[in-house]
Image (tube, rainbow, N blue to C red):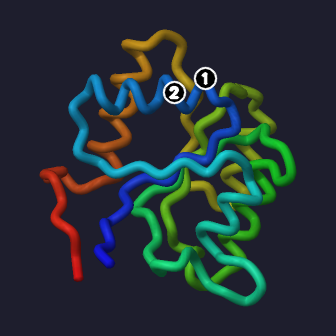
Amino acid sequence: MSIFTLDILLVEDSRSDVELFMLAHQVNGSAATIRVARDGMEAVEVLLGGEGRSGDAQGALPRLVLLDLNMPRLNGFEVLERLRADERTRQLPVVIFSASDQSSDILEAKRLGANGYVRKPVGFENLCATLAQFERDWLSADLAPRHPAG
């Protein structure tokens, strides 16, 4: 079975936010690969596995995690705490991508080891620009279409 490199894991429970993000990805003509986890528990399952497993079945970690804060089951802070406690994901780039601009949220994210904090932009054009900025800042410059490995 072929395995593709995963560039971004978007951890977001809002269906409309996910749809807008994916549309921005398409409009930008991005070659980045994206997977969506619909809540904190799903993100932990993808990244750390369950019942003693480590990571998803393919064993590949994304190059960047975009993590919402306000989610059911496990919130973004709880996910970040678990990621930083595990050797395999301790250095994984995690950027909080939240509607919150509360200074307490920003400080807590930093304290827990987030690599960045970006407030979700208002307006589709701004979302497209933000996604392009994520790619420039966190992914390699050459996002040419990837070929399957293996």
The label number, if any, that marks residue 59 in the structure image = none
Among the 4 quarters of the image, the one containing residue 81: bottom right
State the SS at label 2.
helix
Is 70 left or right of 42, judged from the image as shown?
A: right
The residue under the point 51% across, 27% down is 19
Q: Which of 145 and 117 lies nearest the eye of the viewer? A: 145
Relative image position of residue 131 (x, y in whole percent):
38, 33
Q: Which quadrant is the C terminus positioned in? A: bottom left
Residue 19's tag is: 2
Residue closer to the observer: 67 or 13: 13
Q: Quadrant of residue 25?
A: top left
Residue extending farthest to the bottom is 52
Q: Amino acid at mark 2?
A: Glu
Residue 45 x/y as whole percent: 68, 68
Separation of residues labelled 1 and 2 (CA atoms): 5 Å
Tell me the residue at 70%/38% (across/down).
13
Q: Position of residue 43 (x, y in %)?
A: 66, 59
Residue that badge 1 annotates: 16
Hey, what amino acid is under mark 1? Ser
Q: Are marks 1 and 2 in contact (CB under 8 Å)?
A: yes
